[in-house]
Image (spheres, rainbow, N blue to C red):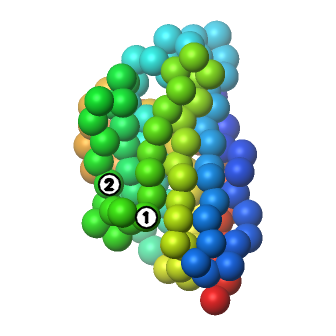
């Protein structure tokens, strides 16, 4: 069993930056982290969960939601079983619970991701 844990959320002012981390732990963590696509999604109050970004196993390919392109960067360090979401130029619309996820393919469909973290709150004040 692999767990995904997301430390790094918090409160930031509009225009600021924040980096989220997602750490895979458990018996198969190293294999899991280096095998699967890693992704981030978010869910704002009263809204459905939406895709944010994803990165392939070797980081050769990435994909981003239009709303975060040019502001967010996803990356991964397989040696540390960790993926990152670096967020710049944050605005109040980015306020949400951010979830780390892992899955077999690079897709913007959140239903294709098979493992999820518990989520971390990101609040952007105006």
Which residue, as the protein is rendered here, is positioned at the far bottom?
A: 126
Corner quadrant of residue 3: top right
Q: Up-down: is 4 above or below 44?
A: above
Does any portion of residue 1 appear in the rendered image? no
**Residue at (61, 81) in percent of width and height:** 14
Q: Residues within 10 Å of mark 2 (few under 14, many from 20)?
A: many
Q: Residues within 10 Å of mark 1 (few under 14, many from 20)?
A: few
Residue 60 drawn at (x, y percent): 29, 30
Q: Which mark is residue 13?
A: none
Give the labeled residue for mark 2: 64
- Nearer the viewer's eye, disc 1 or disc 2? 1
Residue 125 drawn at (x, y percent): 67, 83
Q: CA distance from mark 1 to mark 2?
A: 10 Å
Q: Nearest the camera: 52 or 89?
A: 89
**Residue at (52, 21) in percent of width and height:** 78
Residue 49 drawn at (x, y percent): 43, 62
SS at circle 1: loop
The quadrant in which the N terminus is found is: top right
SS at circle 2: strand
Exactly how many numbered labels are in the figure? 2
Does any portion of residue 13 appear in the rendered image? yes
Residues at discs 1 and 2 in contact (Cβ within 8 Å): no
Q: Up-down: is 116 above or below 65?
A: above
Q: Which mark is residue 71?
A: 1
Q: Earlier in the sequence, mark 1 or mark 2?
A: 2
Residue 70 drawn at (x, y percent): 36, 63
**Residue at (38, 50) in percent of width and height:** 53
The quadrant in which the C terminus is found is: bottom right
């Amino acid at each position: 069993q692999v767990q995904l844990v997301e430390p790094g959320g918090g409160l930031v002012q509009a225009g600021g930056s924040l980096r989220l981390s997602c750490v895979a732990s458990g018996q198969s963590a190293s294999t899991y982290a280096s095998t699967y696509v890693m992704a981030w999604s978010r869910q704002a109050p009263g809204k459905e969960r939406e895709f944010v970004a994803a990165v392939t196993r070797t980081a050769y390919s990435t994909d981003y939601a239009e709303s975060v392109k040019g502001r967010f960067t996803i990356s991964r360090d397989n040696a540390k079983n960790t993926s990152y979401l670096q967020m710049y130029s944050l605005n109040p619309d980015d306020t949400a619970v951010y979830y780390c996820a892992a899955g077999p393919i690079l897709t913007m469909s959140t239903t294709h991701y098979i493992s999820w973290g518990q989520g971390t709150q990101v609040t952007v004040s105006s």
